[in-house]
Amino acid sequence: MKTKLSDFWRIDGTIGRAPYALIGLLLFAVKHNLDRFVAWKFFGRPWSVFSYLRPAITQGIEAGPSSLFVTLLILSLPFAFIGVLLTVKRLRAAHLPIWVAILFFVPFVNLLLFATLCVLPSRRASEIPHDSRPSAIRTFFDWIIPDHPLGAAAIALMLTIVAGLLIAKFSVDGLSTYGAGLFLGVPFAVGMVSVLIYGYHRPRGIAACLGVANLAVLLLAIAFLLVAFEGAICLLMAAPIGVGAANMGGLLGYAIQTRPWQQDDAPPVLFLLVFLLPCLMGADAQIGKTPDLYAVRTSLDVDAPASVVWRNVVSFSELPPPEEMLFRIGIAYPMRAEIKGQGPGAVRYCQFSTGPFVEPIEVWDAPRLLKFTVTANPAPMEEWTPYKEIHPRHLHGFLASRGGQFRLIALPGGRTRLEGTTWYAHHLEPGGYWKLWSDGIIHQIHLRVLRHVKALSEREVH
């Protein structure tokens, strides 16, 4: 069976066992060595075959820079796309249900799937026993799903949005977890199942299928907002990975619904995802993970001596209203700071728009270092919502500051380099993705404080 270059981006056709095994092993070798080179050359991190066996890419990447996670994730996309296409072709050649390709995204199981497809022989349609009698499940789906494309799309959207809401509710309220199953699994399942229902009676075009998948995840986000399950800010933050997962699911759903012979694929996929996804979420919650401690460091130079800067670091007056759009849309921002006592054991209170940080002093080395722990964290934001207020679980304990410090470094000419550091942890997955957001927000908080201290100190001197 000949394999052409165009087969790598065409979803139709079949592929034999030998080409599938050879191309799969070759792609893995290329991807693995590319990951090793990027991790070592640009991030100074070791990488081995066993790094792929760590659940949800936790230990090997999240302990390092978040940009490494994002880089490897982007590099994996073309390989994942080709892998899914080849798996669909191989399933088609073996006359197996194409929905089995969903196992390509399940860790460990995907290795068994690859080995199995390398062994199973291809079969002709005439070799497959066929029962012309429709099953009871198929009869029910024939009745509930309209043949008209608009009616099929409406039913697809309604069913997937209801299922998505229930599964998300189970993850957050039942398991108290914001894991990859919620941010990646739910939109992937919504995109895939909506397309399967939409193309149940007859194959639909790829543009229409992806349109239904994207509309489904958009309406699910709106439903989260309307039922007070989530606020607009976090929905916007989750949109990049959610939309990407929905489109990946939509593409796989499109491949399944183009099958010419397997009319019973949509029902088992729907039930599989509805029951399998909560099971995976539960397993992820049981495994648990000690959150990594991240550090964000920001600095700027102040045209004032360290003794002056120190006084304005220990406590500072009311900051002006924020001009940054980030804070104006609801992200918590610092307003003022005061301290009770002096030296180690004193307690500093940094008042944010959502409440105070309580910061017992650990190191008081005037005018060089002020280091403190954090014993109380206010909510990280005030969510945009059509209601008066909402309190999603992630606002309470899922992102927490553990400590911080201000370091003052004397520079020539009576100037001072002021450096602020925050150590924090969060319980959101995938951690590398959410770290990009949290690092950026904390950096902006640092800048707001440091610029205020700089202005106060330079005004005092000049």
Image (cartoon, rainbow, N blue to C red):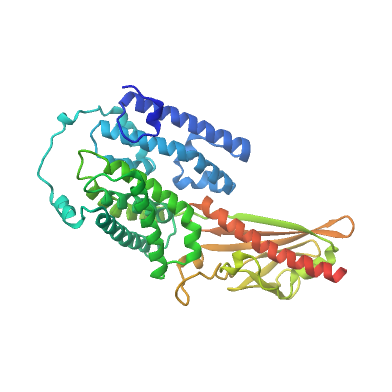
Q: Horizontal and vertical percent for residue 90?
A: 30, 32
Which residue is at the far right? Answer: 413
Name the side, left or right, on which 125 lies relative to 283. Answer: left
**Camera-nearest residue between 224 and 36:** 224
Residue 165 image position (x, y, % from top left): 35, 62
Q: Residue at x 40, y 48 (%)?
A: 247
Is 288 in front, or is 23? 23
> Is any part of residue 443 visible from this angle?
yes
* Percent coordinates x, y for residue 428 in the rendering: 49, 57
Residue 371: image quadrant is: bottom right
Please give the name of the residue rendered at 81% of the width and 64% of the height, measured from the top-left corner: 367
Judge by depth and name the residue closer to the eye, 254 or 206. 206
Identify the image quadrant of the N terminus. Answer: top left
Snapshot quadrant of residue 61: top right
Quadrant in which the C terminus appears: bottom right
Residue furthest to the top in view is 2
User: Does residue 280 appear in the picture of this structure?
Assistant: no
| Total residue callouts | 0
Q: In this image, 211 relative to 256: left or right?
A: right
Residue 405 in picture, x, y percent from top left: 70, 61
Q: Nearer the viewer, residue 109 or 328?
A: 328
